Amino acid sequence: MSDAAGLRLIAAALAIGLGTIGPGIGLGLLVNSALNAMGRNPEAAGQVQINMFIGIAVTEALGIFALVVSLLIGFKIF
Amino acid sequence: MEKLGINVTWLIAQAVNFGLLLFILWTLAYKPVLKMLNDRKVKIQESLEYADKVKQDAAEQQKAFEQKLEATRREMQAATASAAQAGEKEKERILAEARAEARKLVDQAKEQIAYERKQMLAELRQEVVQLSLLAAQKVVRTSLDEQAQRALINDFLAQTDALGKN
Amino acid sequence: MKRWLPILIILAILIVPGLILPRFSTEAVTASVAVTPEVLFSLGGFKISNTLFTSWIVMILITLFAFVSTRKMSLVPSGWQNLMEIIIEGLDGLCTSVAGNRGKKFFPIVATIFLFVLFSNWLGLLPGFGPVGIIPIKEGGHAPAGITTFDLPKEIANSLGAHAGEDTHAAEKPSTDSHATEKPGEPKAGSPAAEVESEMLLAPFFRSPSTDINTTLALALISVILTQIFGMQVVGVLKYWTKFFNFDKIGKFFGSLFKGKPDFGALFYGFIDLFVGLLEFISEMVKILSFTFRLFGNIFAGEVVLLIMTFLFFALPFPFYGLEIFVGFMQAFVFAILTLVFMTIATTAHGAAEHH
């Protein structure tokens, strides 16, 4: 395996690895507070759940960007 | 794009697949199942309403029956009471009649007795007068005149009257 | 002692074959993992990929399920009808609870997405999906370590062969075959074409449609485009697009400019509106991207994890199978509910914002 190919693999791994730290923390906080809210106010659980899913979608998008970048690097697209 | 495997033909094929699946599921699953669910809902609603109605009817019937029963009972009670009253009245009437009869009989008997006694007394007095007269005639024919004789007899009679009264 | 005996037997059953079966081999993993779907055969000049083929199987399975469950509908449900009713009633209830009376409109799309994605995800977990396929081997070459090969008859190989002229073998892995030599033609750095050519790729017969970007992108596009259409339908075409391109306040500024009293506040807020609209527009694009890669990434990564676990130790994937079943359900659910939520937002949020 050449140096360039090895560096490419390292870059891809770093892209996904570092890129998911933030979304991971964010998702944890998000679900934490959503569960708190649901526990305190079970009648509003449905509404909270829907908003939680929207939040998850937005937060997770960042992790997905990292995945896309990692794929782009790993599959030699640039 | 090719390296990620994106291929316009396959993309369109998958979109068409999805459309096809949507159509199949719509005709084969969603429409009949949703209809069935709705039918069931309507049916359950109807059954519940029917059950409610039956329950209400039963309650009404029960009520009517109870009312009837109550009325009958009251009637019966009234009848019993009136019968008892009538009986009482009859009894009293009979009793009163019997009493009146008895009193009448007793009165009659008393009258009879009184009458007979009076009669007897009168007869007795007559007898006494006769006897006295006889006796007196025999005794005083010689010594006394008619007038003294009479007074003596009357005096005697008065005494015997008081005697008879006792 | 008696209690420990069955546990020991189970451990022995788990460990002994693990000692005999093959060890980890990077070549085998490299040959098996590919983002691009492989071409299985051609149908009238139209190349059929294995994921497309599998998605047809998925469609047939779903159709069969729907057919069997609604063939003899009765007011008192039983068997398959029960299952179908539970699924449809649940999804219908979800749509109604999220979108209110518009839920009826969104329901067919949401339910179809859910069923299609769920079946694809779970079908891809079945044994035989992924590791069994055809691998082209050059004359005199060897299959990568850990891959058992069988020679296919020439006619079948040619009819299946997207790689004509090469010796095609049916491959199955893992296996005890471990006498691999170096692949011919070490890739030269800087020449991607040469590298791609030198890679031996296993083309599985069946591959979950969710591990193909085409499928997930098609679903994402359908979801997002239908969201825009519903939005336009409910809010009104012009009004809907002002969500993205709002020139109201800038128009007001020019109006005030012609009157001779330029209203710079309107200009400022107009630019903010434009910027917000641009962000909204980008977020719609991001929705496509995130829908696509969320599903693809989760399922593809799950299958790679299972593959690598199999190569490490054959009993290792069992717990991961449980995880993948859960992830498969979760991703189907998330795809469906996000579609539903975005559709709901597109048909309400803007209209509600108008009232402020």
Image (cartoon, rainbow, N blue to C red):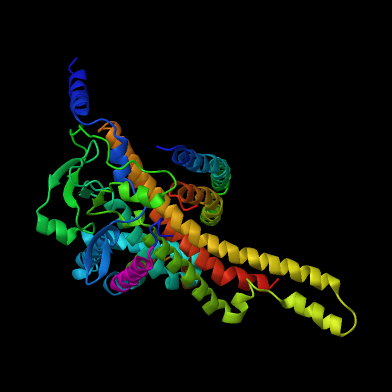
Image quadrant holding the C terminus of chain C, namely bottom right
Spot occupied by residue B49 in the image (x, y as percentages of width and height): 35, 71
Q: Is residue B20 magenta?
A: yes
Front-lying residue, C82 or B105: C82
Vertical arrangement, residue A9 with respect to residue B142, above or below: above
Q: Who's the residue at 90% across and 83% down the image? A: C260
Q: Is residue B12 visible?
A: yes
Q: Eyeballing the image, is C354 above or below C183? A: below
Q: Residue furthest bottom?
A: C259
Q: Which residues are magenta?
A: B7-25
| Residue A70 vs residue C113, the one in the foreground | A70
Q: Is residue C90 visible?
A: no
- Lateral position of residue C117 relative to residue A5, left or right: left
Q: Report the magenta stretch's main SS.
A: helix
Which is more toward the observer, C47 or C335? Answer: C47
Where is residue B112? Give x, y as percent: 33, 70
Number of dots carrying numbers: 0
Q: Report which quarter residue C244 is drawn in.
A: bottom right
Decide if residue A78 is on the left or right side of residue C137: right
Would residue C261 appear left or right of C271 to someone viewing this image?
A: right
